[in-house]
Image (cartoon, rainbow, N blue to C red):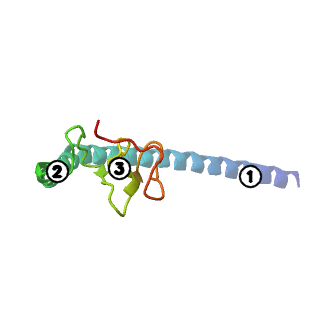
Amino acid sequence: MEDWSNEFVKSIEATVIEVEKFFIDATEEFNHIMDDLTQFSEEIAEEVQNKLIPDLDQFLNDIFEPILDIYLDLELDGIEEEETFDPFVTYVHPSATQNPACRGCNHYHGKIYGGNLLVCGMHPLGVEGDSCPDWESDHD
């Protein structure tokens, strides 16, 4: 009976050794696959960076430079000499229907940022009605 239990323990030890060897071999193979995959992805990234990005950059420049040149060459009505032109910020003039209290006011800002009109520093959203307590003439 003792031989049987010794053989059983040896069999379990052999199984443990084989399972451990299997996991070591599988880990080594997995590491090898990951190294190959990393090298392949680095080669692709380098290829994209060296070939695709410059071509894409040139393509976008070829498309947008003429559009921007035309846009910048347009006559800009209503922009006073002291105002600077920013193609990404839109200026809105006060009118009889939109911010009428701001017409002729020195404090009027009237630029749209992120879809929101900034009327002035004291009244960012404007005032209701036809008069403003902080109105000052824009002509000295």
Category of crowding for the residue at label 2, using alpha-carbon neighbours closer than 10 angstroms: few (below 14), some (14–19), many (at least 20): few
Query: Tag count in the figure?
Result: 3
Q: Furthest residue to the bottom?
A: 97
Q: Which residue position holds label 1?
A: 12
| Alpha carbons under labels 3 and 1: distance apart | 83 Å
Q: Quadrant of residue 95?
A: bottom left
- Between 35 and 132, the one lying in front of the other is 132
Q: Which residue position holds label 3?
A: 110
Category of crowding for the residue at label 1, using alpha-carbon neighbours closer than 10 angstroms: few (below 14), some (14–19), many (at least 20): few
Q: Which residue position holds label 2?
A: 76
Q: Residue at x 46, y 59 (%)?
A: 129
Residue 7: horizontal and vertical position, in percent? 78, 52
Q: Secondary structure at mark 3?
A: loop
Residue 42: horizontal and vertical position, in percent? 33, 43
Residue 45: horizontal and vertical position, in percent? 30, 46
CB within 8 Å, label 2 to label 1: no
The quarter of the rendered structure image containing the N terminus is bottom right
| Alpha carbons under labels 2 and 1: distance apart | 88 Å
Q: Secondary structure at mark 2?
A: loop
Q: Amino acid at mark 2?
A: Leu
- Between 125 and 38, the one lying in front of the other is 125
Residue 130: horizontal and vertical position, in percent? 43, 57
Q: Residue at x 47, y 54 (%)?
A: 127
Q: Amino acid at mark 1?
A: Ile
| Above or below, 3 relative to 35 | below
CB within 8 Å, label 2 to label 3: no
Q: Quadrant of residue 138?
A: top left
- Between 29 and 80, the one lying in front of the other is 80
Q: Earlier in the sequence, mark 3 or mark 1?
A: 1
Q: Is residue 115 visible?
A: no
Q: Secondary structure at mark 1?
A: helix
Left or right: where does residue 4 sit relative to residue 27?
right
